[in-house]
Amino acid sequence: MRDASAAPPVLRMAGVSKSFGATRALDDVTFELGRGQVHALIGENGAGKSTMMKILSGAIAPDAGTMEIDGRRYSPSGPGDGLRCGVSMIYQELTLAPHLTVEENIMLGREVHAAGWLDRKAMERKVREVLELVRHPEISPDVPVGRLSVGAKQVVEIARALLNKSRILVMDEPTSSLSQEDSQRLFEIIRGLRDQNVSVVYISHFLEEVQRVADSYTVLRDGRSVGSGTMEGTTLEDLIQLMVGQKFTQLFPRVDHAVDGTVLSVTDLKGTRMTAPVTLTLSKGEILGVAGLIGSGRTEMLRALFGLDEVEGGTLVVSGAALAGRRPWTRIRRGLGLLSEDRQGEGLALALSVADNMTLSDLAPYRRHGVLSPARQRRAAAEWIGRLKIKAKGPGQTIGDLSGGNQQKVALARLLHQKASVLLLDEPTRGIDVVSKSQIYEWIGGLAREGKAVLFVSSYLPELLGICDRIVVFHRGVLVESRPTAEWTAADLMTAATVGRSSREEHPDQRNAE
Amino acid sequence: MSRQHRPGLGRALNIFGPFIGLLLVIALFSLIPEVQGRFLRFANFKSVATQSVIVALGALGMTLIIIAGGIDLSAASNIALSSVIAAYAINAGAGPLVAILLGVLTGGLVGLANGGLVTRLRLVPFIVTMGMMGIARGAAKWIAGNQKIDAPMTWVNELMAKSPTPSWLLIAPGIWIVILFAVAMAVLLKYTVFGRHIFAVGSNEATARLCGIRTDRIKVLVYTISGLFCGLSGVMEFSRLTVGDPTVAVGLELDIIAAVVIGGGSLSGGEGSILGTMIGVLIMSFLRNGCTMMGWPNYIQEIIIGAIIIIAVALDRLRHRSA
């Protein structure tokens, strides 16, 4: 490890703040990146990491604060400007053109040419050089990028950044979709970059790998930088404590409810998009929390449960009936209801009315001889609007015009309307206001009291700890632990989600895939 | 990390897929005793090639547009308009060369308008060119006074003659023009920065922009070039008909698009090749030719070509999945 204080920092951010509407995404953040250093940026979902990255890339401008690169003022007007100043972003395979070859992608916009005629030989030479530099000479320059693995694509991205003479690479969750082996190779590349005086901002949730690859760290929490230092001498527990802080002051309305009788039982269920089979049970009147990082396989499990993805193996029993296949309607008939995490894209039909959205999954009551009665549909919807205190002009209003919180209430109302008895809720409180949030908590409690079962997926630990009876944790596609809520602490949950095992156990399985 | 795929079977299929299709079509008709004798003759091949010229020229430009992720529904109307302009010019006493230039330029202007509208107004190409389809067709009818424009015979009409003068040309000058431009476009796509940027825009426009490519300029150029080809195609249409007919080539844009798609072009952009497109054109022409020789009615041809389009694209998807 190098001494961070030896050289002047290549990048310095001071007093950087950014608000979106009423939310303060970044609040007086200070950040220093040493030359040739790998600096980890750590924080929970919503801590402000992505905002900070966007500001650094030039995609958005900060409200206040200054940035300097090599002591010179840096205020990029856009991503292209950031690139010219030597700041490159490595996103997940987002910025490659799949039909173009490796060489074409790396050289895109920087082609070697004479009066418009490509000098292919010169470009291939350059590409081979840079692939050598990132220690992947086996990647052939003339293969279309669309045929490469995710890991190889990432190498191509890095190669492109190097060719661009970038001095600062920002990597956002670079290993989240990589295999163990590919991650190892990536770490080697990153170490190689260090020797070429390229500095890396490394954003990741996986704390163990952060510890391995980074020289120093900065932790963000609720938009503030709450701690930074060198990685040496910093333990996992220190980092986790900084990440979760002391923020369990929020009160959650608890509704008393009794748990009895299994209603959903899943054994070794494996959907096409799941990386590992999952086993769990859910009882009537139970609120089961599902914790884990974004991309840890929670949504994929819900999709398999609800029949949105093909079920490859295992069994799924709901109220005594075995279900299989890719047929959501059979799930709905058995009382399953899914609230999508993607409210705008999947959960709601934004151009349709509140009434249509609410009743879409069960139109039978409003149909007579095959003809739908919009009037009765609207009457039924009006009742739900009143009951759930939805702020809308009326059942005929287009749902796209409502606020996020009210849209979410409509989406929930649909599940209640279709009389679902097992509710699969995927991030039901994401991006909605505090008042709506606490209302949703109350309903979930109320539903449990009525004997309904709730599977509650959330990335926000306090709410899981606040309202669930039991919490399971996903890590990289595997359900790693299940405990009653009383036996969990926020730090334990965070550890299990980021490391894959809880702090209490002694390394039950060293995940050495290869 | 992935061992890269060898440029083996997948790539071979990529290039030869449409070619195999063409050979199949030719082989099929060569095996049918009734037509064998007439089908497998140089004279017949020559006439098939001559019939292909108009679609082929339009398809050259359409290939660029489709690779760049766009579409041009106004191609056929543009061809009609350009042919009317060329006829009008000759009728008005202009020299043949001037008439040809005017026809080609008209096409180019329509293309420029398409590109300008797509990039400036940020409209979907489908909508812009669908509108332009009506505008160009209407303009053609207007200029022609809603009837055919008769024009005196000039050497322009020789361009599509099956037996060319001088005779050492062997095939119609129009076919040579197609070959010339096909080679030029293939070279442009493969060996120039511009060509590479066309692929980049169609493959992932956001990436192209991120890499500093002026995507709007690429698009305007592509639509303009395509318009110029439609203009040239219109001149050939006039050469063939010897009159300027504003009602000609209705629905031909679909043949043009079909040729590109059969040749491996993807309507979502980033894929396509000149060679493939030319083979696509020939597949359709040979099918028509063979069906006509068999004495099969028009509707049979339509059904067969429709099926070919679906099969070609389905095979293409299958190949992609296995690759």
Image (cartoon, rainbow, N blue to C red):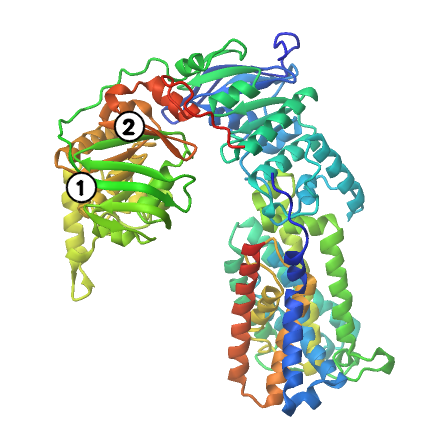
Q: Amino acid at mark 1?
A: Ile
User: In what quadrant of the picture does the C terminus of chain B appear?
Assistant: bottom right
Looking at the picture, does residue A405 appear above or below residue A354? above
Q: Pick whichever, A161 or A23, lies toward us.
A: A161
Reading the image, the residue beneath label 1 is A385
Looking at the picture, does residue B177 appear above or below residue B293? above
In percent of width and height, residue A290 lies at 31, 31
User: What SS does tag 2 mark?
Assistant: strand
- Mark nearer the viewer, 2 or 1: 2
Q: Which badge, 2 or 1, is on the more N-terminal residue?
A: 1
Q: Are marks 2 and 1 in contact (CB under 8 Å)?
A: no
Residue at image coords 55%, 64% = B315
In percent of width and height, residue A106 lies at 68, 39
Q: What's the distance in space between the residues labelled 2 and 1, CA to CA?
A: 31 Å
Observer able to see residue B106: no
Q: Pick whichever, B193 or A264, lies toward us.
A: A264
Observer able to see residue B280: yes
User: In what quadrant of the picture does the N terminus of chain B appear?
Assistant: top right
Q: Is residue A266 left or right of residue A394?
A: right
The image quarter in which residue A91 lies: top right
User: What SS does tag 1 mark?
Assistant: helix
Tag 2 and tag 1 share a subunit: yes
Residue at image coords 14%, 37% = A451
Reading the image, the residue beneath label 2 is A471
